[in-house]
Image (spheres, rainbow, N blue to C red):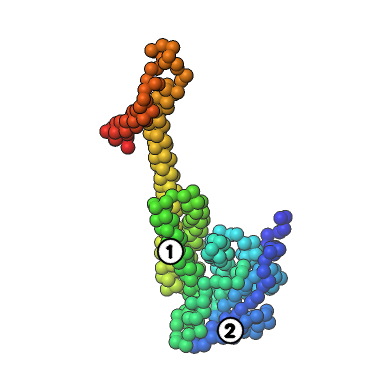
Amino acid sequence: MGASPGTLIADPKAQRSELSLTLIDRDRCEKVDDASLDDLKTHCEKWPLVWLDCVGLANVELIEQIGKVFGLHPLALEDVVNTGQRPKAEFFDDHAFVVVNMIDDPVAYRYEQISLFFGKGFVITFQQREGDPFDPVRKRIVASTPNRLRSRGADYLAYALIDAIVDSFFPLIESASARTDEVEDAMLHHPHKHQVRILHEQRRQAGQLHRTMLSLRDALAGLVRSDAPYIKPETKIFLNDTLDHAYRLVELADTQRDMTTGLIEMHLSLSQARTNEIISLLTIVSAIFIPLTFLVGVWGMNFDPTTSPWNMPELRAYYGYPAALVFMALVAIGLVAFFKWRKWL
């Protein structure tokens, strides 16, 4: 707070910064692990394309030096260390800055910010923590056969990295949909209150994913519409395909959210129906026992038939007790038959 624009302030919880440098030519490539600034200055001018991957954002001095080597805008670097930015695309004279979010922990639904710079001859990615969906891209880069990643330049490599992030959301959506189907099947067989808690959590996650995909879609749309000279028209064709994937993810996330909302409403309806069924059963049982209780109460009063013939003379009947039980059973059976005739049972 109060620092001048472009000032980099590291998060106290940020991980230690480590650099990985991938040097790319049309016919070959090399990788330098635990790279340093000297490696950058030594190799960048000798290779037509370099990909610098920085994992961990604790070393702001190192990030500032990287910005000076590649001429990165200081405000963009400030957004790199201030994580929690919404997905966006910004364009400068000689490079672009793209922020995307990816799922770092599918179980806990923890998001991680990926900041990406690309310009003529370089691509730079900044990650908060170790672990990313870039392995397919790395395998294509080191493949022995010629491929577009080694021949089409920095804008195509940036597209491939962004596309890998976007595609990593599809298994997450499929897994969430499968879990929702499981909850639905269990709910139809036996509704339970813990299912509502699961559905509310899934709806929250779907809503968060929907908002993330909307911002990512807008960022990709900005890349497709950009007239920056370092984004070639043929690369925009591929970016447009990734944009279609983002549109599909928005629709899937929206569908997932609507599905969980519908299941929550259905659970409430099932619970209410179950409650009504229980209340109806209790009401019927009470309706049957009310006249029986009345009869028992009448016969249980302290009358003395020797005092007067009106003092319940049937109290001295030889079969009075079984007769009373049979009479009460007939009353109960008659009430059940009446309820069924009225289709209340």
Foreground: 154 or 108?
108
Q: Mark 1 falls on what kind of element? A: helix
Please provide percent x and percent y for residue 36.
67, 80
Foreground: 27 or 305?
305
Please provide percent x and percent y for residue 152.
47, 79
Q: Residues within 10 Å of mark 1 (few under 14, many from 20)?
A: few
Please provide percent x and percent y for residue 331.
33, 29
Foreground: 255 or 100?
255
- What numbered label is drawn on residue 159? none
Q: Is residue 116 above or below residue 345?
A: below
Quadrant housing the N terminus: bottom right
Quadrant of the image occupied by residue 273: top left
Quadrant housing the C terminus: top left
Q: Residues within 10 Å of mark 2 (few under 14, many from 20)?
A: some
Q: Is residue 189 above or below residue 56?
A: above
Name the kind of residue labelled 1 in the image. Answer: Glu
Q: Which of marks 2 and 1 is nearer the N terminus?
A: 2
Residue at x 27%, y 33% (from the top left corner) = 341
Residue that lies at the very extreme toward the top in this rendered image? 308
- What numbered label is drawn on residue 31? 2
Residue at x 40%, y 24% (from the top left corner) = 295
Please provide percent x and percent y for residue 293.
42, 27
Residue that lies at the very extreme toward the left in this rendered image? 341
- Asked whether residue 321 is in view, the answer is yes
Q: Name the residue under label 1.
A: 174
